[in-house]
Amino acid sequence: QVQLVESGGGSVQAGGSLTLSCAASGSAFRDYNMAWYRQAPGLERELVASIASGGRTDFVDSVKGRFTISRDDAKGILYLQMNSLKPEDTAVYYCYAERTIRAERVLRYWGQGTQVTVSS
């Protein structure tokens, strides 16, 4: 069982920066593929950035060059550094963890979400 707790959300003006953190409890954090999702009002939840257990990262096109995802396996923390924020980045941001056990069972966990509001 893994519990994910996000922090670092808030309100900023366009062009500002925020860093989100996701603290994971439980063991084997380094074995999980991690990601940040977001959901704006009236829209579906979308994948923003991911980082595999081996460190490979990927980003949705709309945040490339502005957001950075990283992880500290020793501390069990996932980060999302967000720069040059835009009003369209306004959403609830969710931490996500996934791990496949022996190629047959997939463990998935979500955090409770943290609000990011960007004003123009």
Image (cartoon, grey):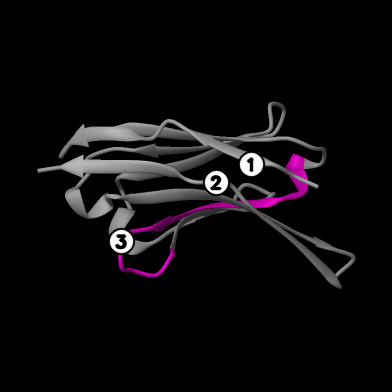
* Nearer-N-terminus badge (2/1): 1
Circle 1 Cα neighbour tier, 10 Å, few/some/many (<14 / 14–19 / ≥20): many
Determine whether label 2 and label 1 are within 8 Å by CB.
Answer: yes
Left or right: 76 with respect to 66? right
**Element carrying mark 3:** loop
Task: Identify the residue at horizontal 69%, vertical 34% (top origin).
Answer: 73
- Nearer the observer, 84 or 23: 23
- Residue 75 higher or lower than 98, as above or below: above
Residue at image mark 3: 41
- Residue 48 higher or lower than 68, as above or below: below
Q: In x, y percent, where is residue 23?
A: 62, 33
Quarter of the image with the C terminus in it? top left
Q: Label 3 to label 1, Cα distance in Å?
A: 22 Å
* Nearer-N-terminus badge (3/1): 1
- Residue 120 higher or lower than 9, as above or below: below
Residue 4 - label: 1
Residue 112 - label: 2
Left or right: 100 with respect to 36? right
Q: Residue furthest top?
A: 75
Is 42 a magenta residue? yes
**Element carrying mark 1:** strand
Amino acid type, label 3: Pro
Span colored in magenta: 29-45
